[in-house]
Image (spheres, rainbow, N blue to C red):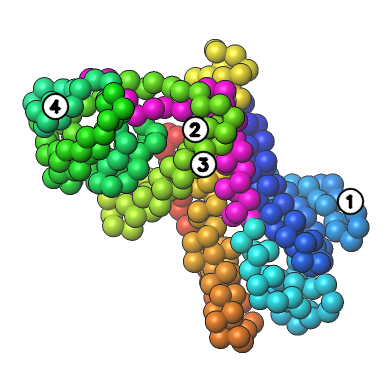
């Protein structure tokens, strides 16, 4: 069941990503040769208004083929015949649509189940929090000057700043705000330095407008989570063997389904939606990275062209994208190998 749900989830997210490219291409009168879901041989294909819509054999990825790699095609309606800013909008639209999809799902989910308010449940002895007068029921509003809206944002801060010695904490009590400087301590049994309190996990339903607002906070959280994870990967705080790809995500989808299924179809849908928010936001961030062959890599060349007012020689750009694609394939094989080994 996990494989089926993972395919459905990936397909929906990929279709929406490619729909972003497609929509902006049409708005800019750019010809789209093929819009496909999946890779490999075509199972079903039908042409409509000059575009072939296809379902491919392998349920991995998708494509919106606009002839962007054909530098010699300068005919009317071709991708390369348009202004640099039109081309930038088309390439950027895919990741932007991922963020939009994540926002839609987050707003719907919060409208149904609410968001986790950062309300302190227990203040533990031996830590500076209790000595500074923090009490159960206090609501965390800022950490080191950064606004906090969700309980998960505090956990994310702890993930990226586990070795900090102190933290400036702002909290609200009875409508008034207080700010304290907490010394973080690592007592016996602690794996990292802690502030010394736990959360109640209180959920709040904020209404329609509030659901959109806190949906945006949720997407921002997952974007920051992805960026923080990349920082930890680059700095060596986590290893390459901890990365997961499609196989690992299928396993997570399966485990999530097994946990939610006893509570009914509603719980399964909400659980899949929560995963979808993370995957869509993650895909948006990853595609904007300045890596050749990804949308971010293409945007780098387009921005260089916008500044220079002269296109980078297509053959040189093509070589860079080819090298980037080869490197990504090697990385995918490595990650897939790690995922498979973790299954046994």
Which callout, 4 or 3, points to the residue nearer the camera? 4
Residue 252 position within the rendered picture, expressed as x and y whole percent measured from the top left: 49, 32
The kind of secondary structure the magenta stretch mainly shows is helix
First-in-chain label (1 vs 2): 1
Query: Which residue occupies 47% across, 57% down?
Result: 331
Q: Quadrant of residue 116?
A: top left
Name the element at disc 2: helix
Name the element at disc 1: strand
Residue on which the image places disc 3: 216
- Residue extent of the magenta highlight: 94-122
Q: Residues within 10 Å of mark 2 (few under 14, many from 20)?
A: some
Query: Which residue occupies 54% across, 57% down?
Result: 287
Q: Nearer the viewer, residue 176 or 294?
A: 176
Which callout, 2 or 3, points to the residue nearer the camera? 3
**Which numbered disc covers residue 133?**
4
Q: Are marks 4 and 1 in contact (CB under 8 Å)?
A: no
Q: Label 4 vs label 2: CA separation? A: 40 Å
Q: Are marks 1 and 3 in contact (CB under 8 Å)?
A: no
Residue on which the image places disc 2: 252
Residue 337 visible within the image: no
Residue 202 position within the rendered picture, expressed as x and y whole percent measured from the top left: 39, 21
Q: Label 4 vs label 1: CA separation? A: 68 Å
Which callout, 4 or 2, points to the residue nearer the camera? 4
Q: Are marks 4 and 3 in contact (CB under 8 Å)?
A: no
Q: Label 4 vs label 3: CA separation? A: 32 Å
Question: Does 102 appear in magenta?
Answer: yes
Residue on which the image places disc 1: 46
């Amino acid at each position: 069941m996990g494989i089926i749900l993972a395919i459905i989830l990936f397909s929906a997210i990929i279709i929406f990503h490619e729909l972003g490219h497609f929509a902006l291409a049409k708005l800019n009168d750019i010809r789209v040769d093929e819009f496909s879901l999946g890779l490999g041989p075509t199972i079903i294909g039908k042409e409509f208004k000059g575009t072939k819509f296809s379902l491919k054999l392998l349920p991995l990825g998708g494509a919106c083929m606009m002839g962007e790699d054909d530098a010699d095609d300068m005919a009317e309606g071709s991708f390369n015949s348009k202004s640099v800013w039109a081309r930038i909008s088309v390439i950027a639209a895919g990741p932007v649509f991922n963020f939009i999809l994540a926002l839609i799902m987050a707003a719907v989910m919060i409208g149904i189940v609410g968001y986790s308010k950062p309300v302190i449940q227990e203040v533990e002895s031996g830590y500076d929090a209790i000595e500074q007068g923090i009490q159960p029921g206090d609501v965390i509003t800022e950490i080191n000057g950064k606004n906090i809206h969700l309980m998960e944002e505090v956990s994310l801060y702890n993930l990226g700043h586990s070795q900090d010695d102190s933290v400036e904490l702002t909290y609200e009590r009875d409508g008034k705000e207080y700010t304290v400087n907490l010394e973080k301590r690592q007592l016996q049994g602690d794996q990292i330095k802690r502030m010394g309190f736990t959360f109640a996990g209180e959920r709040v339903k904020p209404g329609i407008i509030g659901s959109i607002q806190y949906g945006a906070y949720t997407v921002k959280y997952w974007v920051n989570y992805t960026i923080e994870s990349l920082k930890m990967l680059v700095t060596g705080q986590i290893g390459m063997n901890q990365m997961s790809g499609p196989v690992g995500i299928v396993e997570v989808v399966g485990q999530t389904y097994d946990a939610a299924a006893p509570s009914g179809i509603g719980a399964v849908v909400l659980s899949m939606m929560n995963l979808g928010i993370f995957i869509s936001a993650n895909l948006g961030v990853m595609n904007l990275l300045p890596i050749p062959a990804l949308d971010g890599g293409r945007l780098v060349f387009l921005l260089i062209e916008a500044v220079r007012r002269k296109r980078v020689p297509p053959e040189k750009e093509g070589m860079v994208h080819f090298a980037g694609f080869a490197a990504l394939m090697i990385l995918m094989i490595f990650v897939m190998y790690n995922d498979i080994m973790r299954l046994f």
